[in-house]
Amino acid sequence: MEPLLAIVVGVLVAFSVYLMLRKNLVRVVIGVVILSNAVNLLIFTLGRLDRGIPPLIPFTESVPSEVFANPLPQALVLTAIVIGFGLFAFALVLTYRAYTEIGTINVDDMRMAEPPYEGEELPETAVKGEETDS
Amino acid sequence: MNQFIINILLAVVWAAVTGTISLGNLVIGFILGYVVMLVAAPAVDTEHYTRRLRLAVFFIFYFIKELVVSSIRVAKDVIKPSFKMKSGIVGIPLTASSDLEKTLLANCISLTPGTLSVDISDDGNTLFIHAMYIDNEDVDAVRREIKNGMERKILEITRP
Amino acid sequence: MISEIIISFFLLSGSFFVLIAAIGVVRLPDLMMKMHASTKAGTLGAGLVLVSVGIAFDEISVLTRVIATIIFLLLTAPVAAHLIGRAAYYVGMDFWEGTIVDELSDEKTKNADSTDSNVKMNRKASES
Amino acid sequence: MILDTVLIITFAALSISLVAGMARLLIGPSLPDRVVALDLIAYIVIAFIATYSISTGTADFIDAAIVVALIAFLGTAAFARYIQKAGSSTKDDRI
Amino acid sequence: MSHILIYPLLIPILTASIALIFFKSRVFQRWINVLGSGLLLGFSAYLLYMVQSDGIQVLQPGNWEAPFGITLVADLFSALLVCVTGLKAFAISIYSLGDMDERRESFGFHPLYQILIFGVNGAFLTGDLFNLYVWFEVMLITSFVLLSLGNRKTQIDGAVKYVVINLLSSLIFLSGVGIMYGITGTLNLAAMAEALQDGENTGLVITASMMFLVSFGIKSAVFPLFFWLPASYHTPPITVTAIFGALLTKVGVYSLVRVFTLLFTQDIGYTHTILLWISVPTMVVGVLGAASQYDVRKILSFHIVSQIGYMIMGLAFFTKIALAGVIYYILHNILAKTNLFLVAGVAQKYVGSYHLSKLGGLYKNYPLLSSLFAISAISLAGLPPLTGFWAKYTVIYAGLEVQEWVVIGFALAVGLMTMFSMTKIWMGAYWSKLPDKAPVASDPGFKPVSGLHRVALLFPVMLIAAFIVGLGIYGEPFFRILFDAADQLLDPSMYIEAVLNP
Amino acid sequence: MNILLSVLVIFAFAFVGPFVGKYAEKFSGWILALVPLSVFLWFAGFIPEISGGEVFNESHVWVSYLGINMSFYLDGLSLLFALIITGVGTFIMIYGGGYLAGDPNIGRFYFSILLFMGSMLGVVLADNIIALFIFWELTSISSYLLIGYYHEKEESRKSALQALIVTGSGGLAMLAGFIILSIITGTMEISEMFSQSLAVSEHPWYLGMLILVLLGAFTKSAQFPFHFWLPGAMAAPTPVSAYLHSATMVKAGVYLMARLNPVLGGTIEWTYIVTIVGAITMVVGSWLALAHTDLKKVLAYSTVMALGTLTMLIGLGHEYAVKAIAVFILGHSLYKGALFMVAGTVDHEAGTRDVNLISGLRKTMPITATFGCIAALSMAGMAPLLGFIGKELVYEAALSANVFPMALITVAVLANIAVVASSGIVAIRPFFGEYKEHDKHVHEAPASMWIGPAVLSVLSIIFGILPFLIDGTIISKAAASVAGTPELVVSLSLWHGINAALILSVVTFLSGVAVYIFWNSFRDSRGFQGYSSVFGEAPRKGYENWLSGTLSLAAAQTRFFQNGYLRHYLLTVLSFFVIVTGFTLVTKTDVVMAASFTDIMFYEWVIAGVIMIAGLAAVLAGSGLVAIAALGVVGYSISLLYIMFSAPDLAITQVLVETLTVILVALVLIHIPKFSTFTSTASKVRDAVIAGATGLIVTLIILAVLTVEFDPFMTEYFAENSYVVAHGRNIVNVILVDFRALDTFGEIVVIGVAGVGVYGLIKLGKKMIHKEEETTV
Amino acid sequence: MNSVILKTAARLLFPLLLVFSIFLFFRGHNEPGGGFIGGLVGASAFVLFAIAFGTEVTRKLLRIDPRILIGWGLFFALVSGIMSMMAGDAFFTGQWIFPVLFGSEIHLGTPLIFDIGVYLVVVGFTLAVIFALEEEN
Ligand code: NA
Ligand code: NA
């Protein structure tokens, strides 16, 4: 199973990278979310996989008599999910703020902190219609 | 008094979900229930809680029956190569008055054959449902069926 | 053995209804119709499979949790359908050609400014 | 013995359902269509988890099913809220 | 088992949580912030003393033996950084009394500040790779919030770039952690180092090291990964910029040093050559960037990049004296950079701008501020006898020892350019006449600070300046610690021994 | 301790100086002059011992780990310099007090000049080369402050920067040279290097190291083509010019070469480089002096000439040369210090230094005129002044040069002709001729301003007439130090009989007079203008072009890299990732597809497929909501995977987080309208390639790691302790709250901060921030 | 959202979700669940309520500013560690007592206090975010 997940992770990484390179900040943030999912899967996979033996000690025993799935990656991924969620929430609301303050979610138009250099020609952006940024 | 019963009920629910029906667990459940009620008090109209819970239990089986029947009919139609039925949104004048009754009715309708609650009018007197099967294009038949079927059954229980 | 058969029955019927729901969501002609399929068949299908779990484990703690799950499903599924249907309706959805009546539309034209939505209330208005 | 076969059939049915649900999610065409598909996928996931519990004989997964049952509804409510507020229309929600 | 190790973490987070509980009282938050920072400074100094006298200190929170729990470790390198962080935290907590506005305070500046320090100390003290990731995230989210707190357009814009690139960095880091865990089966740095000693899977480990290189490279703002820094650091209030500018990138450098001395030493000819290649353009691009700017904060931001280059260069040389130089460089840079940002903030309060074209007359009117700037600037420019000289000297000596002529040539040229841009600020803001368009001259509503406010702003600068001068003029005891620290880095067996066989 | 103390005392008084300037305005110069005076007297006390052949070593541990000691070496050479520094320094303090009387910034002057004095003293006394370098740089810093004394004038700021950049860059090169030298010799003490001269010159790094060290010396001592900063530095107040730019700092380079001559000198490389550079500087500088009418500029260029002379002599390095060095240094310091002060006095009193605007001042300021003329005579090399002896020795040295003597003697004569003419310009033009009326009423300067020139010029006479006062004592030992021999007999006298040198002197004088007479027309001649622009202006222009070139390069590269576009930044970062990771993966590991797909259940294929397809849907989605719906499917499917691989906690968490994600996105997107942009196909392809490469690399790495045998020893430990010690049966949760509680604590801090941050981000309105903050950009 | 059906369902689901969250929280030490999961479900109860009734009502229901809840959460988590230190052990070392309640032994330890901290922070975080965003409408 692990090799299949390796491919899934790679594919998700590719998707997320592509999204992060878009102009639309919402897409960029979605890219980050996908990447974070992919990385969680990566850790989970590299901790090696086992089917149907969750790391729970039965009520009848104090030291498990049988082997079970590696609990450590689970704990790590759980932590990573939560952290990722916190960061995501912030990034998302930042996107919202960017929209209300700067008036755009097009990252190419965000030139407040780094205003255009003298004589710099700004690219034509936010051209509506013709083609979607996909 | 009602609140005490609710508390007891919550303790039982607790014991049920935890799966250990011991005195200790019930006591813990009771304490937790008390805390929950403390938190939830403003949210829940506790006056009607007992009745609500009783209804919930009562209706489960009724729902399940209706659910199975409705699902089988939908299943048939889903598999059929073409769709011949007539459908539409029908307004049902409500006899049910409390929010609970209306909600219960709306949910039941959604889970029974070919009907789906869409909205309740702003004055609260009409329930609009989407009917999948308006047989013979008789809209009033649909209305009647709901009024005499589901609504009456609910009101029988909620207003003994 | 008996229990195995019972479990199998619930599993098969449950997965059957889930499948029906899925096919319905794919095949049925408009949103309301799809919701009929997903709400009813989906709930039922998932519920039946859950019942099989309750039987399979023969433990009170599992059973109670199964029942809790089913209750939650029955409580939430119709509400979800209602919310989606209502929202979709108000922003203007396409009905399939077999639709013969829309009494909600008449009601809403009567008092167009009484809802909480700030968008076009009326299906016809949004279509024009 | 029977159960093993039944489980395979069940998994197959659920897999097909999952694919079908996802197909609707991809096709849309409107956002509500997709939300209905997502809602359906939640049911499929519940069934999947339940079936998997039986196939592995581990009841510990059932809690996940409860959570899905309770929580997926919230997502749908949020979508509904969005649809109603933002007035996302049927037409331009193409993929 | 050394309980002292927990205090650099416990004090700031306890301060922060109390400040959060008393969210509504700004005054209380201010003073608990200063109090907490002062205590932290004391305990950090004690920690350094302990490590110096008793060797590497180890604590197993939860009392689980390594490598099963999370280990906290303080070798000299860590302890030094914790100590200077404490100093900086204390200084800036006082400065913030004079700089931070009420709104930001009531939206959590003080607890966030403490949490940032908490995260930084955690990163310095942890002996666990995944835990390091967690600390990075603590710092990251806190810096996100501090950066954007205030919601000005420029802040939001800067924050967007900062957030996205740093999130990418974190995720690369996390992948690296997963991969290292997948190879070694452990997360404990010491255990991991031990597991890697057998030399198996070297190629794979080196590949993984590249992920750490990229991730920590982003955090420490090396070429070509630094863009987020000049894009954002000039946007928040100067207190925040000072915290970030001096400290956060150094955590990245710290981590690079840590992993490239403890874990990834299998193929130094490869890994450290790449580090060397990165360091040169980092120095050059950073200093040229600074030369092209006219906003003091931007000049200083680009300088951060440039100076990181020196640190990476020292790491690449990988000799004892080079590592001692790297540590010196980090510590020096934290002090000098903090002070330069703080001084820029004071100047802004006096004259009303950060832009050289709107600044002037500071030398004439504010001799104390001028001398404080001069001390920090001379130090940063690497001129003797202040800390910057020793930092630069040590690293350059190391480079000449290993005969990296070309690299050192660049390093020296960059040193000249650094001096040039320090004089640019000096001439533009201090020596030049107060321009008519300066807010203090043109805006009748402009009120320069006075009284206690001024004390709050200048005292911390003087405190740090005293260290810059003191360490510069008499560095013998300090160098003893640095060379011991470098010894510990070059011989990981001490670290491994202390953690695994206490 | 004592030598160190002598330096520290001066440093300490640098910090006292401003207060003296403030509270004892009128007498501040006189009071502060006591500082260098007492140090001078203290050093003078060493003369007997030094001339008796003793040397003094003093060492204090400073940074032992770097081999850097605060060590000092006092021999003839350093004593000579120490005496000049403190001696001339004494009069400079007095003069400065008078010159800047009433200037509110006089305190800063005292600070900087005393700082400089201490540093300069450190340079000439230090034995440790790094200590020497540190003092050296301190002279650069303090001279920067002094040149920029009139800092509100742009000219001053520019000149200060120019001097700093030129000497600073040389200094950096020198630092590298020093370090290499110390690596070669294994010591940092110059006194310990003397014995390793041979080893040094035969070392393969010798030439490189030599060039680096010489760069430092040449820039500091204003050797061609770095000489241009020195006339620029005349923007400084005159006391500064007199001190730094004639008597002391510019001689630091000369000192350094003289000091290191025993270690580095004597080789072909040394002789050629140093001699030629010195000779060129000598002749170029001397004639450039004639291009100016500003007294200070004339003196500055003649100083360039003197520095060139000294450099050339060091390059020659033979017995005559080292003698000439010692005498010339002293002679030059005396007359040039005096002349600068005189020029300053003229400027101070007459309001201008342009010799075309002033004349006949001897009537109103006779004292100044007298001493100015004496000093000028010394500079012109007239007997019986010390300058004469110095010049004679230079000629003798040139005549006995071991490399191209004819060329050198020609150069020396040519240069001295110009010097004679310059002397005429500075002595005759302002003081003789018709007295012109000035805006300002000119009168004699106060005593503070003529006492310096008086003493220095009188010393020129005394040492000239009575050379035995110095030759056997200080001069011979200084010369011996330069030569690197313990003993060197120097016997100076005015009269050597009629020899080649004397004849050359006569020729020089006569030619110089001729040049002086025709100076006005000569100055305006085309040829000379051209000469002046090639040798005077071109190097300065070169510097300026270099500076502006660097700045435009800086601007261009910053525009390129830091262009403000997030996508560009990300693209660069990701490309870098792909390159370093991919390259390492390909070159360092065996990339084998050892993957086996046999043990996978069919529904696992389906779930994996659903994840990937839903992910693709998220990529292709036309709106954020659709993307997030697709993302919901990805999340639910991943949680199914977690279930299948025994991670119920993870699955639950994933479901919860996924759902909340959907809610958050919905809440946010309500406010953001749909927006579409045009992206070119080319950039989409480019992005897709980067994306694909990144994904491929990650997959390959995972596959590679999966081939490594995994050691589950941690799992066993957790299993054994989870319930028994930590009282928990859910091992994942026990890890979270106990084994790795610190992680979890960090995690809740993260989300806690995120909560506070999001709240602030939304609630803290822009309007709430102080208004002025918005305007400060 | 102005829907009677939703409002009624929310009132019904609110206490259920809350009980369920506490259930998940308590059993987390032995079975799937724990502070984080429990906290999220608990927060979901309030989120649902906020969607149905708006934030003003929900804030009153919560009674405490979510940010202060975060502060308390961190404080609780820290207290668990400080208790270990006061017992002379390393920070975060579990301290356990085993009181017998109605015949059954209960395991009470500082990790439980820690987990309460986690629970509170999660609730505080989720609600701070959701409330703030909801109130933008
Ligand atoms: Na950073
Ligand atoms: Na200016």
Image: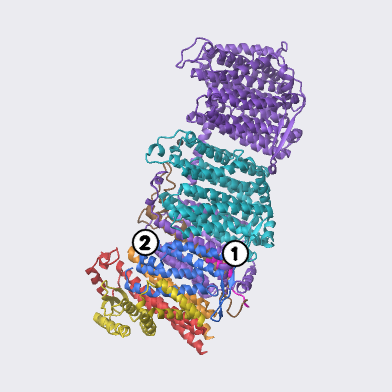
Q: Quadrant of residue F167?
A: top right
Looking at this view, name the residue that lies furthest to the front. Answer: F23
Range of magenta residues: A64-78
Looking at this view, name the residue that lies furthest to the left. Answer: C110
F667 over F417 or under it: above or below: below
Question: Which chain comes out cyan in the rendered image?
Answer: E
Specify whether residue F604 is in view: no
For the residues beneath circles 2 and 1, the answer to whether they share a chain is yes
**Chain C, chosen colour in render:** red
For the residue marked with disc 1, what is the amino acid? Met
Q: Residue E211: give x, y in percent of width and height.
A: 57, 57
Question: Which chain comes out blue in the rendered image?
Answer: G
Q: Quadrant of the C terminus of chain F?
A: top left
Residue G86 numbered tag = 1
D22 over A31 or under it: above or below: below
Q: Residue E41: give x, y in percent of width and height.
A: 58, 51
**Chain A, chosen colour in render:** brown
Mark 1 — on which chain does it sit? G
Q: Residue G80: give x, y in percent of width and height.
A: 55, 66
**Chain B, chosen colour in render:** yellow
Taking the spot 62% from the left edge, 38% from the top edge, the residue there is: E385
Q: Is residue A102 left or right of residue F522?
A: left
Question: Which chain comes out orange in the rendered image?
Answer: D
For the residue marked with disc 2, what is the amino acid? Glu
E21 over C50 or under it: above or below: above
